[in-house]
Amino acid sequence: MVDYLWNTQSPLQKALVAGRHGVAGAQAGVTLVEVRDLVLVQVMARRGKAADTAKAAKKLFGVDAPNTPKAVAGKSATLVWSGPDQFTVLAPRTDESSQIDAMSQAFSGAASLSDQSDGRCLIRVSGPRGRDAIAKFSSLDLHDAAFPVGTAANTSVDHTAVNCWREANGADGHPVYSMLVFTSFADSLWHAIVDSSLEYGVDTSRTRAA
Amino acid sequence: MSGYSGSEPLGRTAAAEGSTNARSQAASASQSHRLRSGGLIDRQAPLQFSFDGKTMTGFAGDTLASALVANGVKLVARSFKYHRPRGIITAGSEEPSALVEMRTGARKEPNTRATTQELYDGLIAQSQNRWPSLRRDFMSINQLFSPIFVAGFYYKTFMWPAKFWEAIYEPIIRRAAGLGKSAELPDPDHYDKAWAHCDVLVVGAGPTGLSAALAAGRAGSRVILVEEDVRLGGRLLSDGGEIDGMHAEEWVRRATDELAGLPNVRIMTRTALFGVYDGGVHAALERVNDHVPVPGPHQVRQRIWRIVAKRSVVTAGAIERPIAFPGNDRPGVMMASAVRTYVHRFAAMPGKRVALFTNNDDGWRTVEAIQQAGGDIAAVIDPRGKVPAEYQALAELSDLRVLAGGVSDVKGGVDGVRGLVVTAADGRKQQIDADCLAVSGGWNPNVGLSCFHRGKPVWRDDIAAFVPGDCPTGMVMAGAANGEFSLGACLRDGHAAGVAAAADCGASGNAGEASEAGDEVYAISPLWQVKAKGKAFVDFQHDVTASDVTLAQREGFESVEHLKRYTTLGMATDQGKTSNITGLAIMADATGRTISQTGTTIYRPPYAPVAIGALAGHHRDENFHAWRLTPSHHWAAARGAVFVDTGLWKRAQWYPQPGEKDWIESVSREVLAVRNGVGFCDVSTLGKVDVRGADAGTFLDRVYINAFSSLAVGKARYGLMLREDGIVMDDGTTSRLAEDHYFLTTTTAKAGPVMAHLEFCRQVLWPELDVQLSSASDQWAQFSIAGPNTRKLLQALVDPSEDMSNEGFPFMGAREVKLRGGVTARLFRISFSGEIAFEISVPARYGAAMAENLMIAGKPYGVTPYGTEALGVMRIEKGHVAGPELNGMTTADDLGLGKMMSKKKDFIGRVMAGREALTAPDRQVVVGIKPLDRARRLRSGAHVIPKGGIPGPATDQGYVTSVCFSPMMEQWIGLGLVERGRERIGEIVRIHDPLRSEDYEAEICNPVFYDPEGARQRG
């Protein structure tokens, strides 16, 4: 019997050419990173079970699940608000099925889960000119006062839905934004983000979620 | 707008000039009309440019217009209709006359205002609308016929025969009249769009705007200050003055420095606001690289900004208006404020002997400006008949020749003004020798932006001008734009507006005090036209004269909106910035109404011309819209697939093989491979929705016309959903994966709308149901595997523990299966092709591997990847409906699916589907159609007419919706929507295709052409 290889492929397989692009210079203005190997689960409270869902989230992740547009870092996972009575859990992929099983048990009876690990692609934008690049494709006001660390938003880029939130500032002191995009749009949006960044110089790479 | 406070020159002093190098000395020498000192220009940085092939020199800081003035160039353009010689009239973005073609080749850009084009080294500009040359323009012969070329001439003259208008008259007229020509090559430059956000948007950086920005910025609000010029300062750069005891330029410098030092203030120069929209959204155009020959690497040429502001303070200043008198368009007739700008800001003399025609005090500033620059004032013509008090001493000191009356003619032509005739009130005429005429008819507050939400400007008699009426929500106007014409008042008004706007946004820091300046008197006696023989222009860009306006009145076009359309007044690229008010004032006079009664036309964005390229931004060529890729896209591309755009998706259409002569051959091969063996197709584009919750079944019962709560776990069912109006919305299969979990699929095209519809149902219609929805469209790579050898292929792929027999996995079964190698898939036994078929889903990351593994597993059976064309052929052969039949007009019964409508339950669209017209027996329903001539190609869109009928609306009985070449039937076949079609199986009809001039006979048949019993897919 033949052996079947199940190699995985990122939606950015072709689009992401790691390295420096656009204007040359000592420091790239924008840093783009594809964050791979995530477990990503949408948690939607059953009707009338929002409190139970919150309790289960607290028990499993050690934090209060966000009930406003925020991203909170919990034990082994980040919880990002994605709508009324629902949020998305992102965790580095270790043992996928046991991670999902653990969540299924924790939220059993309280919430419906939808595995979106392959439905979304996570792109992280940072660097001194990251905000300027984002301004070209996003209508979000990312000013510190309007969008502090931990803020999340459901927005649209190029007419498609994107979840965006602000991570802790990078080591260079500049803001870091995570953009969760639909897998089928990832190639297109990556190009749009790179094109928006070329005039500032852009560094692209991929990394495993940690 | 106070007078000069002293003779201190701007910019470089004469001392600095001593150190200029040889090149700049030579440059100065060639600039016959350049003043020896002064101006905000860098004499160390000479710039070469060419106009109509003649090389000239200017300095950094010049505009193209100021450099032309400095070189003594008067003639720069030919007018739109009469081809009259024209010069530079203004020094700003309101310029109606000095339009040029910038650059060459693919970067050629017509109708560029020379007054806003910054000079750069190597600039190339051409005059436009002339042949063979600007000085000797053949079409200026039009002037001889000008008595008949009045408003409405074309409409009256070229009426017969009617057919000739589009074919002959209009092309000829358009060639004769016109502006510049655009490049015919693709624009090599890039453009983009960006968002910006602030509390307070300040529009215009003159004294009022700077004052407002300082106040709002100091108070702590987030401020964006936009200025179309490259420098801040507005009229202060041209008229100087004294503010807070310092020279105006020094005040501008300090204000600029302070603003630049405030972290909450963003200054955007070269940025013109052109639109105001709902929700505080403003649109602005930044000319990022119009001041260089070619944008730097990865730089854009222009950028559209969408600025979201909680409050806006519009400090856009005022525009000086011309007076209509014969010869007022001669090159060398210029707005008085523009004369001062060229002299003071650019150190360029528009004339050596300047006459001034003004009806207001502000125009008198020009006297001192000219005299300080060493020019002569030939005369001041002021219809008010006396020297304003403020200028009496000056007039006496310099023995000014001051005349009452008006300019009734201007002598001159291509070489500019040679002199003028002044007619006094008593009719006495005097000749004045002058080479430049400065005109001021007063100032119009720049109310445009205040009117974009249909606010109507309000007339003020004291300043003889319109001021803003109701502004868009959140906007205030301040300074000259608000009718405040003294410098002191502008500074106070701007400060107050800045403080108030910041406070509205919750910023309460110390805004400081308003700067102080004098409150000079602005007295005006309105004068719109001097009635005398000869063409007196109102709209310079569209060649509309004062007599055109009165002609419109005589012919009954008295409303300003009619006046505009009949004469084209204000319809040119400048949108009548210098002409509209004058035109309607002349109309008011002709009709005996007040100007207020006459009113203004509607103001609409854009305020200034915006290139389509800028509006498109990044979205051109391959970036026209976003694209979606299937999980096997790169795999298919590597195999040479031809892709087709299906909505945003790129789908493999077919996979050409070497030696195949056309797409039909490739597609037929793929179809036969499936029907005789096995093939697979990526169908990941189908919409997929996880429907969960205790009430998921009830929810689907209400959404679909057929029942789903009764569906067993592990089974799939075809479902059809209607819109509320009873028309079919979408179809697809939905499977029950668990008691509380359904997996719903939609068509590719309707994935988004169906998801929105389901969310509406969940959130709005039935919030009491326990249902959770999530889009899983992108989570799964889904492949259709079809053909008699499908089961053999799958047996090689799935784990041996899985029962793949007909009993173990029956038709319409749906469940998870383990695949060899450890991946879990979802398998659905559903068929679109009519063959034994499964759809298999794996997480998207395995999509490419799945395609590869299907090739391996199916290799012994000649597995063939197929594209959307083969998919389409097989569904037509099977009579399955798709997009062309689900066209937003068909009912379930039209599609032959009426029996699916449950009578035991309610569902969306049930009641409305019962309407008389939707159940009428003569509706057009889906049938099969095949041409009698088996070699004939059937085409979709062709009409169905009864045999022997004469094609026409009365005999039209439907049309062909989908066609294909069927390799199984060995002929072209199709589906169609035909009146009473199901009763007419076997009938011969006429297929009429006027679009492609085809006419032939065809037979109406059962839409299921292939395997009508459906035995193959169940086997």
Image (cartoon, coloured by chain):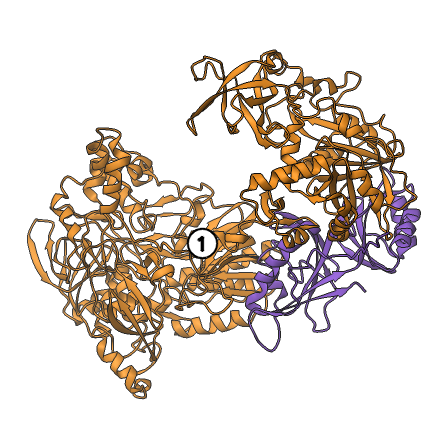
The image position of residue B619, as x and y in percent, is: 52, 52
The image position of residue B201, as x and y in percent, is: 52, 57
Q: How dense is the environment of label 1, judged by Cα within 10 Å: few (below 14), some, or many (20 and up)? A: some
- Tell me the shade of chain A: purple
Compared across the picture, whether B919 is left or right of B460 comes to right
Compared across the picture, whether B21 is left or right of B868 comes to left
Compared across the picture, whether B387 is left or right of A110 comes to left
User: In the depicted view, which residue is nearer to us: B546 or A62?
Assistant: A62
User: In the depicted view, which residue is nearer to us: B208 or A200?
Assistant: A200
Query: Can see residue B205?
Result: yes
Find residue B271 and report its image quarter.
Answer: bottom left
Badge 1 amino acid: Gly
- Tell me the shade of chain B: orange
Secondary structure category for the residue under label 1: helix
Numbered-mark total: 1
The image position of residue B1019, as x and y in percent, is: 81, 29
Query: Can see residue B507?
Result: no
Q: Which residue is mark 1?
A: B613
Q: Chain of mark 1?
A: B
Find residue A93 and report its image quarter.
Answer: bottom right
The image position of residue B870, as x and y in percent, is: 64, 37
User: In the depicted view, which residue is nearer to us: B691 or B835?
Assistant: B835
Location of the N terminus of chain B by quadrant is bottom left
**Above/below status of B436 relative to B948:** below
